[in-house]
Amino acid sequence: MTKIWLSSIVFILFACGSSKEINLKEVDHIFIDYNSNKANNYTQKIDARICVKTIYGEIIPLKKDKGFSSSGNASCSPQNESITLNRAPTIFDDSLVLIDLVYTNKQGEFVKSTDTLLLNFKAKIQLASAANAGAQGGIGSSGSTALFFRNGKDADPGNTGQNGVDGDAYILHVWKIADMHYIQVDNQTTGVRNTYQIRGIENFYLTSIGGKGGNGGQGGDGGDGKNGEVTDKKSKSAGNGGNGGNGGNGGQGGNGGSFTIIIHPNAAAFQSNIRLNSVPGEGGEAGKGGEGGRAGLANKGESQPDNGSGGGNGFKGRKGNEGTIQFKNESFVWE
């Protein structure tokens, strides 16, 4: 296993999950302990321990995540004894990954090393993208008590939620050299190209999910009617409550992403190992109708006016459609 050490030591004391404290004056470096022959790859969790090696040759594994951190290209968990790479490769044969390993104590002092993770590309690849959801519809304006009229004002309906965004569209080129399958993934929606490899016959998974439709806005509440009034000169009857606004409809879910896969004849047998999933977005939820306004209090001897009617609920948005998946077997010159 190839390793590269770049150690920067600050003299502190810290516990490595064992009952024994380690004097950092005795620390040589922090390193990754893993089986480089076991199948690994981008996107997959890799079994690995984060360990300290002392100047006396003693190996002490870290047992807790607290106080430990790593560079942004990897998520390392001493507690779970695992590493997952966070970056997507943009060149082929990108098999050496440098990872900074840092332990920080409560005083902010730290020890830092850099180690190398060697990928053998023997494990599967699992990729997924999810489009943005539609925005929720606005809430309808509530009615008010009318200035010149007795009845409360009817409320406005809620707005319809926006449609979810369609899932990303992809073009894949697949070819083979010796026992290595090369998969060039071009995201046509974002313009990003990534490059993956699988040694042997492990599966390649890619999912593209449409965005959920935005929820419908809630209908506004109806305004209250005015109370009855009796004066020496005249009598004013109580007003009815205003009707609540209808809830807005949910937005339509975005369509699942589409895929075009161009497979070189030398990799034709790998087609059955390419698993694509176009997932439509769900429709947005219906907005609820607003409440009816309260009727005003009737004058003595007069019949009580009516409360406003509650608004009706909107309709749930329609689910999106699945995107297209097209395989093409044709020769091409890879880059």
Image (cartoon, rainbow, N blue to C red):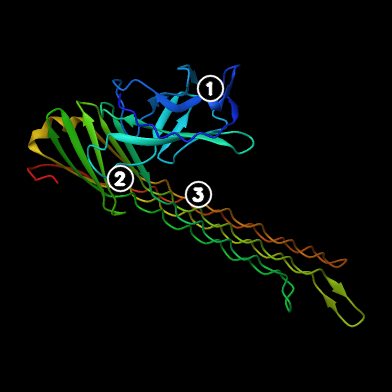
Left or right of 4: which side holds 62?
Answer: right
Q: If you read the primary sequence from the N terminus, does the residue marked by circle 3 or circle 2 appear first?
A: 3
Q: Is residue 24 left or right of residue 119?
A: right
Element under label 1?
loop
Depicted 262 relative to depicted 135: above or below: above
- Mark 1 lies on residue: 63
Q: Quadrant of residue 309?
A: bottom right
Closer to us: 277 or 124: 124
- Residue 39: assigned label: none
Hey, what amino acid is under mark 1?
Lys
Left or right, 217 with reference to 306: left
Label 3, secondary structure: give it.
loop
Q: Which residue is mark 3?
A: 285
Q: Residue at x 39, y 28 (%)?
A: 45
Q: Earlier in the sequence, mark 2 or mark 1?
A: 1
The local crowd at label 2, few if under 14, some if 14 to 19, many if 20 or more residues have their Cα within 10 Å, is many
Residue 114, located in which quarter of the rendered image?
top left
Query: Quick one: label 1 or label 3, which is nearer the N terminus?
Result: 1
Inspect this view and state whether residue 284 appears.
yes
Residue, disc 2: 322
Residue that extends furthest to the bottom in the rendered view of this protein = 233
Amino acid of disc 3 = Glu
Label 3, label 2: how many angstroms apart (C-alpha)? 20 Å
Callout 2: helix, strand or loop? loop
Which mark's residue is nearer the viewer, 2 or 1? 1
Q: Residue at x 45, y 17 (%)?
A: 57
Q: Amino acid at mark 2?
A: Glu
